[in-house]
Amino acid sequence: MSDQSLLSVVVTTYNRSETVAQVLRALAVQTDRQFEVVIADDGSNAQHQQAIALSAAACHLKVTHVWHPDVGFTASVARNRGVFHSSGNYIIFIDGDCVPDVDFIAQHRAIREADCFVNGSRVLLSPSFTDQVISENLNLAGRSLGYWLQRRICGDCSKLTGQLRFPLSRGRRQAQFRWRGIKSCNMGVWRHHFELVNGFDSTFNGWGHEDADFVLRLHNAHVIRKNGFCATEVYHLWHREANRQSESFNAEKVRSRIGTGQVCADIGYAQLANDASVVVRRWG
């Protein structure tokens, strides 16, 4: 049974311990404390798993870590497993290299509506600034507008929307399906809507567009997209692009579903099997 006041933050990760440490540290200083953290680990190595435990302890943060073996890029399965081991009635998905500001949870709680999912936004950080954040262990959460203005002038961040707070209702609802701007690295959805569309579709293998498919099926289920720009931004630490050899195939699969009205994933949340290879640990 889900907790009606608890929000579940599902953090997707794979072998980037230094960035997950930044995310956990930011989550530990949120103004809204009614949330849990679930790490959806897509097959990281033992060193990364241990680093997550150490980061959780250092932040005094309770963390559920859900790991499955590395069989390639299977973020859809990892997210579904993360939700399965969560308890909140509202799920926020972020990636393990996307650092939230101090009011991130509060803003997601405030912006949500009964008939909507929230498509969040991100601020891209430069390679050099990302290196500085990691090497100097800089805390990004709670920085001032002046700090980010200086970073913008230096070319260290892509925009200043992380510091802006626009009204949470006006002009945010988007009735039509629109591919552009879909970001599973920052997305909020009600658990019953997630279950209605059968979660993420694990037939999407490799990088790309499993999030667009998820949003398309939410749209087909009459769940309205609400954009979270200038409200729920995260700071996206730079990384090299993932292998994108599956992108065009996955994109074509989404295109083929437009107009079909498909709601449920072919193989998704409801098809999660009791897999003895999945390891669940709880820290804090």
Image (cartoon, rainbow, N blue to C red):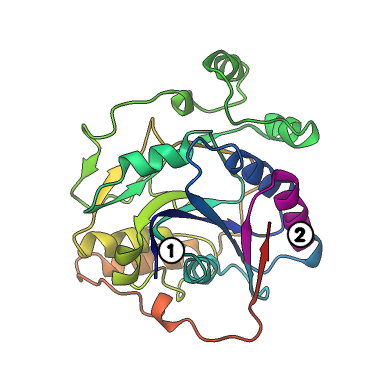
Q: Is residue 196 left or right of residue 1?
A: left
Kind of residue sitting beneath label 1:
Glu
Magenta region, main secondary structure: helix
Asked if residue 197 shows in the view, the reply is: no
Residue position for label 2: 48
Closer to the chain start, of discs 1 and 2, is: 2
- Under mark 2, the amino acid is His
Look at the image and tell me in which quarter the N terminus lies. Answer: bottom left
Q: Quadrant of residue 222?
A: bottom left
User: In front of the other: label 1 or label 2?
Assistant: 2
Within 10 Å of disc 1 (Cα), the crowding (few <14, some 14-19, many 20+) is many
- Tell me where residue 240 appears, x and y as whole percent: 66, 47
Residue that mark 1 sits on: 210
- Residue at 75% x, 37% y is 134
Q: Is residue 200 magenta?
A: no
- Direction from residue 214 to residue 161 in the image, left or right: right
- Image x and y of residue 68, in percent: 64, 74
Measure the alpha-carbon separation of dots 1 and 2: 25 Å
Query: Circle 2: is it few (<14), some (14-19), or many (20+) Cα within 10 Å?
Result: some
Question: Which portion, as a residue range, is magenta?
Answer: 49-65
Q: Is residue 24 left or right of residue 188?
A: right
